[in-house]
Amino acid sequence: MAEPTIIQERQLLYQVVKFAAAPVAHAMCRPHVSGASHVPRTGPAILAANHLSVLDSFLLPALLPRHVTFAAKNEYFSGNPVSSWFMRLGGSLPTDRESAHAAQAMLDAAADLLERGELFGIHPEGTRSPDGRLYRGKIGVAWLALKTGAPVLPVALKGTEKVLPVGSRVPRPAKIGITIGEPLKVAGDHTNARDRRRVTDDIMAAIQRLSGQEYVPTYAASHKASNGVAEPPAKKTRRTGG
């Protein structure tokens, strides 16, 4: 668990950065946000969002009043310098998707955040959609919800892929939409695989209803692999594939 002084310093830095970044996000994205009243003013909640752009983990926190910590893959911190800058400013939590141990460590850190009454954001698809469709969710989001008891807010992002298109290094103006749904009631045992799968599928169904995306019952990473969409080395500034 992070020391209280470190947490306070991190929150102060976040607020300073947000004060500067929020007007930029509004100017560039002309966002339409609906359902923000579903985000609790205090206490924990999990924001489970679809994933269309590398900037999703920055734009949503920038446009909400409370501090939101997002999980983001390591490549976002060491690949495209623009995405790296945004991820660090947004206070995202890096995770190694190739390591089960590292993934669990990230979930444990997220559970710690929720138990402190904070907001945590996650993209259950695990990687960016390759074609704008909504893919099967990974069960980490259900593990968190069932273990901590934190409510899950489904979130639908629209148009964020136009702000920083794949292969682009410079953000561009584009209108985006953010819809936040009502808190979902989840029940079950976080150690039970069937409960985790059921809850995850329920969360993805709620996101799909908000986003209107076509649903694909396979993992986005598997779809990318079967279609030859490779993940380039993290140190490159080309497409990072997730």
Image (cartoon, rainbow, N blue to C red):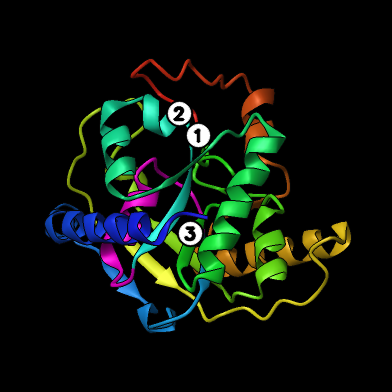
Query: Mark 3 — residue?
Result: 121
Residue 76 can be seen in this image: yes
Mark 3 vs mark 1, CA separation in Å: 16 Å
**Along the line of sight, which residue is nearer the eye, 119 or 128?**
119
Quick check: marks 2 and 3 in contact, CB under 8 Å? no
Residue at 39% in and 57% down: 158
Decide if residue 157 is on the left or right side of residue 19.
right
The x, y position of residue 99, in whole percent, is 67, 31
Mark 2 vs mark 3, CA separation in Å: 18 Å
Residue at 27% in and 27% down: 81
Quick check: marks 1 and 2 in contact, CB under 8 Å? yes
208 relative to 73, above or below: below
Front tag of 1 and 2: 2
Query: Tag 2 or tag 1, which sits nearer the N-term?
Result: 2
The amino acid at mark 2 is: Glu
The x, y position of residue 138, in whole percent, is 69, 49
Query: Mark 1 — residue?
Result: 242
Front tag of 3 and 1: 3
128 relative to 228, above or below: below
Magenta-drawn segment:
49-66
The amino acid at mark 1 is: Gly
Decide if residue 220 is on the left or right side of residue 199.
left
24 relative to 172, above or below: below
The amino acid at mark 3 is: Gly
Would you identify the image quadrant in which residue 27 lies?
bottom left
The x, y position of residue 117, in whole percent, is 48, 74
Query: Mark 2 — residue?
Result: 75
Residue at 16% in and 58% down: 16
SS assignment at label 1: loop
The x, y position of residue 124, in whole percent, is 60, 53
Query: Tag 3 or tag 2, which sits nearer the N-term?
Result: 2
**Along the line of sight, which residue is nearer the eye, 185 or 211?**
185
